[in-house]
């Protein structure tokens, strides 16, 4: 992969921004460190994690991205809202990637508390934004090896 033709989109939630900005920083730095030029990376802010799949789907429809990296943070509260949100978002992001043929990377933290989230944004558990960037790079390479064209679900 040269980084000259690949284009990446990062969709990041502004909810829990004190966490998601660290995910975004890790993601960007990893892409750049692996040869992706800044001008080949588009960042789209979502108001919350629930809105990320809608934005990702719209970006897929543009047919210009090699991969879409989705970053967010959901922290368990006192109600079942957490469970519904995590299930809906993970299922929809999986569906989008599977049906479109565009790698959609799940970089959304689903944590019991703020401490767990902090551990995953550069703390004891690394930076999941960085790991998401690496997953996107690997998927683009896999698709290139399989000779999958840029048109979703079409083969060269």
Image (cartoon, grey):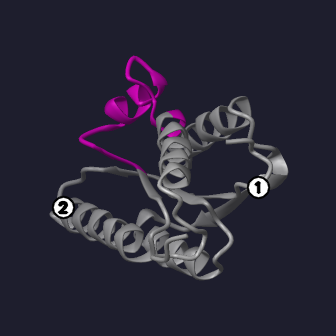
Q: Is residue 2 above or below residue 97?
A: above
Quarter of the image holding residue 120? top left
Residue 70 visible in this rendered orientation of the protein:
no
Q: Residue at x 30, y 62 (%)?
A: 90
For the N terminus, the image quarter is top right
Among all residues in the image, which is located at the extreme top? 124
Residue 21's disc is none
Q: Is residue 57 magenta?
A: no
What element does badge 1 sit on?
loop
Among all residues in the image, which is located at the extreme left? 80
Residue 5's disc is 1
Residue 22 percent across, percent down from the top left: 58, 37
Residue 135 percent across, percent down from the top left: 47, 42
Q: Residue at x 35, y 29 (%)?
A: 115
Q: Which residue matches tag 2? A: 83
Along the viewing direction, whichever of 9 and 143 lies nearer the viewer: 143
Q: Residue at x 80, y 49 (%)?
A: 4
């Amino acid at each position: 992969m040269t980084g000259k033709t690949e284009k990446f989109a990062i969709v990041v939630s502004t909810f829990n921004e004190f966490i998601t900005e660290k995910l975004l920083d890790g993601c960007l730095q990893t892409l750049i460190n692996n040869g992706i030029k800044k001008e080949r990376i588009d960042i789209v802010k979502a108001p919350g994690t629930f809105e990320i799949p809608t934005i990702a789907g719209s970006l897929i429809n543009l047919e210009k991205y090699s991969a879409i990296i989705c970053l967010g943070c959901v922290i368990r509260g006192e109600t079942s809202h957490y469970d519904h949100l995590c299930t809906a978002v993970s299922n929809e992001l999986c569906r989008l990637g599977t049906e479109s043929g565009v790698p959609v990377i799940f970089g959304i933290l689903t944590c019991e508390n703020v401490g767990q989230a902090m551990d995953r944004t550069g703390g004891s558990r690394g930076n999941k934004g960085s790991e998401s960037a690496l997953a996107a790079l690997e998927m683009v390479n896999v698709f290139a090896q399989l000779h999958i064209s840029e048109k979703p679900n079409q083969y060269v």
